[in-house]
């Protein structure tokens, strides 16, 4: 199933700050691009489901929270975090 991936304004701001402050901007960009690619095809199966209905996925050095609307085929990235040491 294909999904459209959108970002909340908060997530866009967080990603921009992470990128600006990163020692390895290329690594941040590659991780986010990979996350976005994965979410476009398998969002409803990825990450851990939170009881509130949103999901969280980590692909170092980033973690994202996102919501999936299968009916609309839409994924909304709600927040982006820098997690270089997260397992």
Image: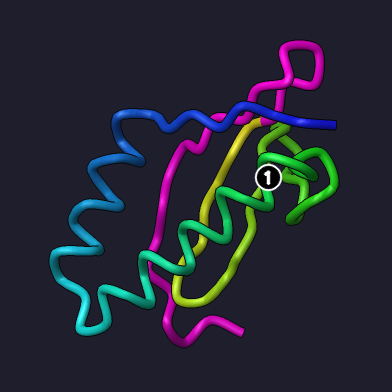
Determine whether the residue tagged by mark 1 lies in a helix, strand or loop. Answer: strand
- How many labels were placed on the picture? 1
Q: Residues within 10 Å of mark 1 (few under 14, many from 20)?
A: many
Q: Residue 53, how many percent across, how many down?
A: 73, 32
Asked if the magenta segment contains residue 73, the reply would be yes
Q: Going by the image, does 7 lie left or right of 47?
A: left
Q: Quadrant of the C terminus?
A: bottom right
Residue depicted at x 52% and y 76%:
60
The region drawn magenta spans 68-87
Q: Quadrant of the N terminus?
A: top right
Instruction: Relative to 33, say whether 72 is above or below.
Output: above
Instruction: Relative to 62, say whether 32 is above or below.
Output: above
Q: Which residue is mark 1?
A: 55
| Display colour scheme | rainbow
Residue depicted at x 38% and y 77%:
27
Residue depicted at x 36% and y 70%:
28
Asked if the magenta segment contains residue 14, the reply would be no
In the depicted view, which residue is nearer to us: 52 or 68? 68
Q: Residue 31, how many percent across, how many down?
A: 48, 67
Q: Residue 8, how many percent across, how many down?
A: 39, 29
Question: Which residue is outermost to the left?
Answer: 20
Residue depicted at x 52% and y 53%:
64
Question: Which residue is outermost to the top?
Answer: 72
Q: Going by the image, does 46 lie left or right of 66?
A: right
Q: Residue 12, how many percent across, how many down?
A: 30, 40
């Amino acid at each position: 199933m294909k999904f459209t991936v959108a970002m909340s304004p908060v997530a866009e701001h967080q990603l921009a700050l992470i990128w600006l402050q990163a020692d390895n901007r290329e690594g941040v960009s590659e991780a986010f691009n990979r996350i976005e690619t994965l979410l476009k095809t398998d969002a409803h199966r990825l990450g851990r489901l939170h009881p509130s209905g949103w999901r969280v996925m980590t692909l170092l050095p980033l973690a994202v929270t996102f919501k999936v609307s299968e009916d609309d085929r839409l994924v909304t990235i709600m927040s982006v975090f820098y997690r270089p040491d997260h397992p």
